[in-house]
Image (cartoon, grey):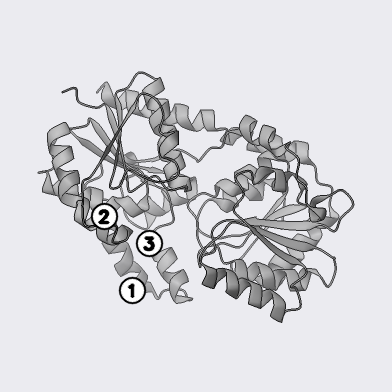
């Protein structure tokens, strides 16, 4: 049996940024002539049809039904260990933060095979940021240090960690103490040509027509991370100066949707907040929106920011860890405010609404994040490593 040059490890094929990026990286590796596999705990999900040609898909055989991602990942560790031990991919890349602990434990269970280079793609902020956000407070120094120490353990067996932005790469080195020689930064990228083509598709909604009130757009799943409740509070402040409306693309549990709808109604914004659900073409909304607002408590590197800029749409955001500030701040002062500063976010939105859109400058800025550059960087790193 031929050893794979590259195997990308993930949980499933759900419609998420981590999975999409894993599929793109796998496809680029295969297109470059590398023997490429995709190993998942469960080989199903809406992106199954997007597994690139030339990429072998393998999955664990768990049985016993779906017990949730955490339990199923734990149950799959022996199967992943057997895969690493028997198939021995030259590079095994853990595709996202959710996968790192299982990949590391499986590697140890397999006996830490010296001819398998275990890599990690750091797809999100380091662990203490989401934990602090979940608790709704900054973690005391000793607590944050303890969490960093635990996080450091999961990276101990990774020969290389690829961060999706420079800020995150800095955290891995400075906060977790990883060697800078083992940390690479390959920024997230988006397919600019595809986005711009899709953005030109018609959008038949009264709010998005020329001459309508300005629309503030947000996008993502309804979750504590995305923090859309702050955007609804922000809108209430913005509407003292502008008849703006808020559209939140995406979906989530009925409970979270209901909470957002009740909040909007309580603030007298029921007619100014729209939750249209998931749209396979969010870019046409971006093209017609006045701006994109990001209120996340943490990110890895926000693809939705890059997508909005590709559509020529301005962005205003919280300075959440990680990556957003390094993309948005070069576009001008006052576009990034401190997390939780609703009044500051509202003021930034009002200022930006009064300024020229300047789509050409925004689209020029985002050219550096074209997906082709990102995938070329992965392929070059794979090939350089395999030649050693």
Q: Marks 1/3: CA distance?
A: 14 Å
Whichever of labels 3 and 2 marks the residue nearer the N terminus, that label is: 2
Q: What secondary structure is marked by label 3?
A: loop
Q: Are marks 1 and 2 in contact (CB under 8 Å)?
A: no
Whichever of labels 1 and 3 marks the residue nearer the N terminus, that label is: 3
Q: What secondary structure is marked by label 2?
A: helix
The answer to whether 123 appears left or right of 83 in the picture is right
Residue at horizontal 50 percent and vertical 60 percent from the top: 298
Q: Marks 3/2: CA distance?
A: 18 Å
Quarter of the picture holding the C terminus: top left
Q: What secondary structure is marked by label 1?
A: helix
Residue at horizontal 24 percent and vertical 48 percent from the top: 103
Q: Which residue is mark 1?
A: 142
Q: Residues within 10 Å of mark 2 (few under 14, many from 20)?
A: many
Q: Residues within 10 Å of mark 1 (few under 14, many from 20)?
A: few
Q: Which residue is mark 3?
A: 127
Please name whichever residue, 267 or 165, is drawn nearer the observer in this view of the structure: 267
Q: Which residue is mark 2?
A: 73
Please tell me whether residue 63 is drawn above or below residue 21 in the rendered image: below
Please tell me whether residue 77 is drawn above or below residue 245 in the rendered image: above
Please name whichever residue, 253 or 366, is drawn nearer the observer in this view of the structure: 253
Q: Residues within 10 Å of mark 3 (few under 14, many from 20)?
A: some
Q: Where residue 248 sits: x, y (%)? A: 65, 59
Please tell me whether residue 258 is drawn above or below residue 332 in the rendered image: below
Q: Where residue 194 sits: x, y (%)? A: 62, 32
Residue at horizontal 75 percent and vertical 38 percent from the top: 361
Q: Nearer the viewer, mark 3 or mark 2?
A: 2
Q: Marks 1/2: CA distance?
A: 30 Å
Give residue 277's quadrant in the image. Answer: bottom right
Whichever of labels 1 and 2 marks the residue nearer the N terminus, that label is: 2
The answer, for residue 241, to whether it is visible in the render is: yes
The answer, for residue 185, to whether it is visible in the render is: no
């Amino acid at each position: 049996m031929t050893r794979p040059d590259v195997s990308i490890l993930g949980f499933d094929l759900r419609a998420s940024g981590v999975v999409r990026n894993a599929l793109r990286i796998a496809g680029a590796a295969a297109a470059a002539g590398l023997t490429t596999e995709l190993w998942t705990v469960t080989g199903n999900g809406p992106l199954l049809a997007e597994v690139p040609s030339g990429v072998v898909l393998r999955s664990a055989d768990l049985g016993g039904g779906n017990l949730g991602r955490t339990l199923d990942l734990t149950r799959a560790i022996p199967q992943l260990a057997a895969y690493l031990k028997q198939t021995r991919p030259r590079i095994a890349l853990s595709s996202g933060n959710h996968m790192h602990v299982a990949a590391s434990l499986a590697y140890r269970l397999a006996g830490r095979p010296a001819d398998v280079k275990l890599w990690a793609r750091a797809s999100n902020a380091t662990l203490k940021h989401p934990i602090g956000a979940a608790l709704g407070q900054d973690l005391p120094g000793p607590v944050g240090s303890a969490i960093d120490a635990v996080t450091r353990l999961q990276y101990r067996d990774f020969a290389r960690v690829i961060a999706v932005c420079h800020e995150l790469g800095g955290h891995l080195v400075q906060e977790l103490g990883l060697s800078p020689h083992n940390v690479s930064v390959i920024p997230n990228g988006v397919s600019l040509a595809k986005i711009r083509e899709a953005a030109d598709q018609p959008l038949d909604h009264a709010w998005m027509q020329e001459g309508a009130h300005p629309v503030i757009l947000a996008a993502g799943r309804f979750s504590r991370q995305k923090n859309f409740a702050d955007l609804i509070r922000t809108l209430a402040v913005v509407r003292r100066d502008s008849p703006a409306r808020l559209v939140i693309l995406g979906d989530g549990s009925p409970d979270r949707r209901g909470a957002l709808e009740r909040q909007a109604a309580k603030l007298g914004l029921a007619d100014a907040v729209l939750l249209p659900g998931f749209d396979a073409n969010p870019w046409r909304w971006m093209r017609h929106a006045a701006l994109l607002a990001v209120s996340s408590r943490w990110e890895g590197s926000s693809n939705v920011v890059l997508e909005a800029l590709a559509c020529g749409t301005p962005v205003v955001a919280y300075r959440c860890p990680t990556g957003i500030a390094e993309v948005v701040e070069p576009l001008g002062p006052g576009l990034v405010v401190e997390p939780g500063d609703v009044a500051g976010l509202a003021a930034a939105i009002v200022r930006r609404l009064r300024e020229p859109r300047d789509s050409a400058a925004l689209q020029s800025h985002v050219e550096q994040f074209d997906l082709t550059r990102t995938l070329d960087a992965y392929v070059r790193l794979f090939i350089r490593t395999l030649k050693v």
